[in-house]
Image: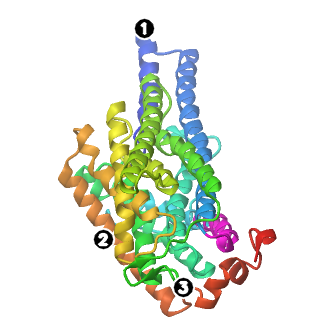
Amino acid sequence: MRVLMKQTGRLAAMASAAIVSAGMAHGQEATVEERLAALEGSASGYVDNSYLFLISGLVVMFMAAGFCMLESGLVRSKNAAMQSTKNIALFSVAGLMFYLIGYQILYPSSWIIENYLGMPAIWAPGDLATSDGGYASSSDWYFQMVFVATAASIVSGTVAERVRIWPFLIFTAFLTGIIYPIQCSWQWGEGWLYDMGFSDFAGSTLVHSVGGWAALVGAIVIGPRTGKYFGKAVNPMPGSNIPLAALGTFILWFGWFGFNGGSQLAAGGVENINSVAKIFVNTNMAAVGGVLAAMILTAALYKGKIDSTMAFNGAIGGLVSITAEPLTPAVWQSVLIGGIGGVLVVLTVPMLDRFKIDDVVGAIPAHLVCGIWGTLAVPITNTGTSFLTQLIGVVAIGAFVVVMSAIGWFLLKLTLGVRASEEEEMEGLDKTEIGLEAYPEFAS
């Protein structure tokens, strides 16, 4: 239903046109057989579009496993079980909140304040016998639900190794049920940003930078891990399993084809399926550019040594960068856009350390910074947008998410408390929060 579906009404119009043309061809009103044939063609498009949502949604859901593996590999072994549990729990919370109120806020049937805030209501699937709207209503809900879970996963990696699980899940409910759908409604729900001409094809800002802003505020409110910073010195805390993090990166890379490709929102017809195919190519090549740029830059900065974690996040940064507009760029432009994303990742990590902002997995550079870059880069290849409108969208959404996230994190800090004690942190959250260890055989 993205922006009331880019294809809303197209299938109905095609069916009507087919019926009319069939009747005109015989100089009379269309026969029953001709009407059925036209409707069958319409149903075919309905099925194609619904399958695109469902298959893309399944692929995007696999990104949850990618985030889980990436984060579990980049945290220390004493926190890997906690990170795994957080990821499966946040996906569940996101699904419940999006069902209860999130979807109806994103696509409201009525408004409290026109174009700004939707009326919360529980979503319900459409009639099984209907083909209205050009796609199955449940297929659209599922596709949108896995998107909101992605935003929550971004926060999980940044605040790892010191956040307590229940306060984190309460914030996740607030993010996925309130913050995310409200700002999404401004664009994908045909709100005021949509009216201005703001463009974000698959969510560089609406999904990734939203998660990045929420993660940034959380990292500031919660504070860095104990022992991470000593004055101006940074104490490296390497992850426990680099091959696992590499697996997570590949899974995320794979999942992005559903993320961007599914956002075409239609698979019926030659133009639509060709567009999906081109989106796949551009998405892949942006990741390629991000990886290679991050590897080359780290080798130049670190005396020939390549930082594997930078290469992983370079891939993600490239993917986030192309997400705002994966259709209009040429292939070489996609490589360049992704490559700039990879460079931004490498440059942002030490900047965060300079301000003592502890981002365990590098989600802020990859999702927030590259999300902003990708959104501002849209007018380079899409002449239907403007830099000013894109900037307004980035600033408005950023300000909204920062304020709302600050309210959420500070309320949790003042009530339940959001971080583990120093003793619990030193022992590891696997034992203190989860009650079991990810790697018990190797415990000292």
Height in image: 444 above or below 364?
A: below
For residue 25, which numbered disc appears in the image? 1
The CA distance from mark 2 to mark 3 is 23 Å
213 inside magenta stretch? no
- Mark 2 or mark 3, which has the lower sequence index? 2
Asked if residue 282 can be seen in this view, the reply is: yes
Judge from the rendering whether residue 335 lies leftward or rightward of residue 86; answer left or right: left
**Element under disc 2:** helix
| Tag 3 residue | 418
Residues drawn in magenta: 76-94
**Element under disc 3:** loop
| Tag 2 residue | 399
**Given the current orientation, which residue lies at the most extreme top position?**
26
Asked if residue 108 can be seen in this view, the reply is: no
Q: Main secondary structure of the magenta part?
A: helix
Disc 3 packing (10 Å; few <14; some 14–19; many ≥20): many
Q: Are marks 2 and 3 in contact (CB under 8 Å)?
A: no
